[in-house]
Image: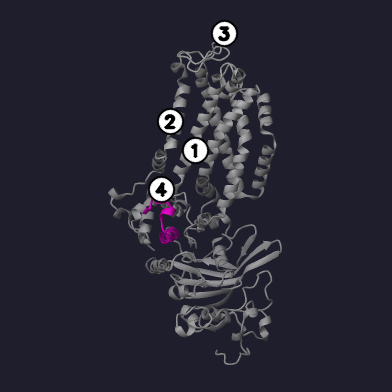
């Protein structure tokens, strides 16, 4: 196995839900890589498929309504896309761990924090209570929980939101997973705590070398945290790029829209109405036939009624937009 | 990757002792005065029932026809009944049956109801359907009739009373537990547990069950008086405890005929039922609060 191989390589990931009114494909042909020791962002609006991507990777898509298929999901060289549920359970918590959005409700209120944080150890390594307590204490110190010794026996309600999220991160990392998926880990926290948690995750990546998938709708977090970015829209990847590239040369109109909608504190802008992308995320059961963003796109062209592929716009940078196809008719003043 | 500090690096003296859950709960329970009063009453009652032959100078079964329906006196503290038997002694002996009948079938129906309720709520699908339709059947059936049928066909003895009461009681417990489980399984901490690779069985045992316990305790403290009442009804109808054995329900039933000559014969065991039921309710409330982590600070 090559150290340059990505820790996670997803190809052709499709997730569908069957309902009363037919099947809905919530993820369509999703493909991306996560490099070793990298933080990779998944951005998009609510309903774009970010969280569903995480659940699909974890094998946590509710059954039998949901079904997941993929050409391959290589985790450190091993294809986990065809594993049966029991084998997948052994992967969860040991090789891939997840940190959830709501630290307030992600811990069982009637069990002590250390028992829960140490649960993956009991499941995957069969350690005894004493050994687990000791490891949890180490983890508490690692994630910067003050007075870790007294916090072991705390119940979740005795910890603040920030401490609980630290505990959740400790739980995620306790089996030294190859990949940590953080699903909007700071959305429910106040701004100061948010900054601390993000700093902690970056610090852990640097010290421990965990690869992280960071799911967020906040481009500020992406800019601060990520090495690479995947922009999702209506269940598809619409742009993939290095983080600097993405902010410098956003190549999909949707990404540009997102970047334009970030509120800025400058006086000149403050007087103006905040820019936003017109329209709404399409209903996944009734998608437009061509490009899924076309109905909201300001640069829509004749080709847009046909679905575009991810087209390369530079080294490691791709966008799902006809603007980048050879011979595309560019609107006036558009730069390539 | 090295996350773990070398375990040897932590001095042995600092190995972190775990605060005992049981000790925490006991401490919280002791702070609740009503619960402690209830507990004291139940303990006294149990001691009284167990040591009745040594406490009471009277024989609960010996008939003294010239001492019928005597009023309260130094010899007979609560008077005598229509056969001249000491009422207080019969209450003490009756406590043996009433307490056991109150507690054992409740425990059995709680156990069955909890297991089936959690399975039904968490697994869902066919399991849920089968369990809930069974429960519907049990609830749709008139419970008294069902219990009587069991007692009549299997014979009137204590073991069959347990059986009849457990058969009648589990369904409502299962329903309550199932509905709680349905709410719990959607909680984020259950998903977090699944993301850790926790198996379904382990989720039910160590995540769902502890969250159901407070409800179970309330149900339990309510089902004890109910079971005592059920036993009384069955005994009253003649398919429960058989005279000359004494149970509180039977004492009330038999004593009510002499309400005007000697009210204590019926009222005293009634008061015993009332006090016991209250004591168990206080204990139940105290336990529920003591088991709730947010009440322990």
Mark 2, Cα crowd under 10 Å, few <14 / some 14-19 / many 20+, is some
Q: Nearer the viewer, mark 4 or mark 1?
A: 1
Q: Nearer the viewer, mark 2 or mark 4?
A: 2
Residue B170 spot, x, y in % from top left: 61, 37
Report whether mark 3 lies on the same chain as mark 4: no
The verdict on residue B9 being magenta is no
Q: Chain of mark 4?
A: A
Mark 1, Cα crowd under 10 Å, few <14 / some 14-19 / many 20+, is many
Instruction: Find residue B65 and name its label.
Output: 3
- Is the Cβ of the residue at disc 2 closer than 8 Å to that at disc 4? no
* x 46%, y 23%: residue: B48
Disc 2 to disc 4, C-alpha distance: 38 Å
Disc 3 to disc 2, C-alpha distance: 37 Å
Disc 3 to disc 1, C-alpha distance: 43 Å
Q: Nearer the viewer, mark 3 or mark 1?
A: 3
Residue extending farthest front: B260
């Amino acid at each position: 196995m090559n150290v340059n191989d990505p820790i996670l390589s997803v190809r052709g990931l499709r997730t569908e839900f069957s309902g009363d009114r037919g099947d809905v494909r919530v993820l369509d042909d999703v493909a991306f890589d996560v490099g070793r020791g990298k933080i990779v962002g998944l951005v998009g609006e609510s309903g774009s498929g970010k969280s569903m991507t995480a659940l699909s990777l974890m094998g946590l898509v509710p059954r039998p309504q949901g079904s997941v298929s993929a050409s391959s999901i290589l985790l450190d060289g091993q294809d986990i896309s065809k594993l049966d549920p029991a084998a997948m359970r052994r992967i969860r918590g040991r090789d891939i761990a997840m940190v959830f959005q709501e630290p307030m409700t992600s811990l069982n209120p009637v069990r002590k924090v250390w028992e829960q944080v140490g649960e993956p150890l009991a499941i995957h390594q069969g350690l005894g209570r004493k050994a687990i307590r000791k490891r949890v204490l180490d983890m508490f110190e690692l994630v910067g929980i003050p007075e870790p010794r007294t916090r072991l026996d705390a119940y979740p309600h005795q910890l603040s939101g920030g401490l609980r999220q630290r505990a959740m991160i400790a739980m995620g990392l306790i089996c030294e997973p190859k990949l940590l998926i953080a699903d909007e880990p700071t959305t429910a926290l106040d701004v100061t705590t948010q900054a601390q948690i993000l700093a902690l995750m970056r610090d852990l990546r640097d010290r421990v070398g965990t690869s992280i998938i960071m799911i967020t709708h906040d481009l500020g977090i992406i800019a601060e945290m990520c090495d690479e970015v995947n922009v999702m829209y209506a269940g598809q990847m619409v742009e993939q790029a290095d983080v600097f590239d993405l902010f410098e040369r956003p190549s999909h109109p949707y990404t540009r829209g997102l970047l334009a909608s970030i509120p800025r504190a400058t006086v000149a802008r403050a007087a103006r109405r905040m820019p936003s992308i017109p329209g709404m995320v399409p209903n996944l059961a009734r998608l437009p036939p061509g490009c899924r963003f076309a109905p909201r796109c300001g640069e829509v062209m004749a080709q847009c009624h046909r679905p575009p592929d991810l087209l390369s716009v530079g080294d490691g940078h791709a966008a799902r937009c006809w603007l980048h196809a050879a011979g595309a008719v560019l609107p006036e003043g558009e730069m390539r | 990757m090295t996350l773990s500090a070398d375990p040897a690096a932590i001095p042995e003296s600092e190995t972190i002792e775990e605060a005992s859950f049981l000790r925490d709960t006991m401490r919280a329970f002791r702070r609740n005065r009503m619960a402690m009063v209830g507990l004291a009453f139940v303990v006294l009652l149990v001691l009284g029932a167990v040591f009745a032959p040594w406490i009471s100078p009277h024989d609960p079964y010996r008939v003294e026809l010239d001492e019928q329906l005597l009023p309260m006196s130094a010899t007979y503290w609560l008077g005598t009944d229509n056969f001249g038997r000491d009422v207080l002694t019969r209450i003490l002996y009756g406590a043996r049956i009433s307490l056991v009948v109150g507690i054992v079938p409740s425990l059995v129906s709680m156990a069955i109801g909890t297991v089936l309720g959690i399975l039904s709520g968490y697994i869902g699908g066919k399991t849920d359907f089968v369990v809930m339709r069974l429960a519907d059947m049990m609830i749709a059936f008139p419970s008294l009739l069902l219990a009587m049928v069991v007692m009549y066909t299997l014979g009137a003895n204590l073991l069959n009373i347990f059986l009849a009461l457990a058969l009648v009681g589990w369904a409502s417990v299962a329903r309550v537990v199932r509905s709680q489980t349905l709410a719990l399984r959607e909680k984020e901490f259950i998903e977090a547990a699944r993301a850790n690779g926790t198996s379904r069985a382990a989720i039910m045992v160590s995540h769902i069950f502890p969250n159901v316990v407070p409800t179970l305790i309330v149900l339990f403290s309510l089902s004890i008086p109910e079971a005592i009442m059920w036993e009384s009804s069955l005994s009253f109808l003649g398919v429960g405890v058989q005279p000359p054995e004494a149970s509180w329900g039977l004492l009330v039933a038999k004593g009510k005929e002499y309400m005007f000559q000697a009210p204590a014969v019926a009222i005293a065991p009634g008061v015993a039922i009332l006090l016991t039921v209250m004591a168990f309710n206080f204990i139940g409330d105290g336990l529920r609060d003591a088991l709730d982590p947010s009440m322990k600070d």
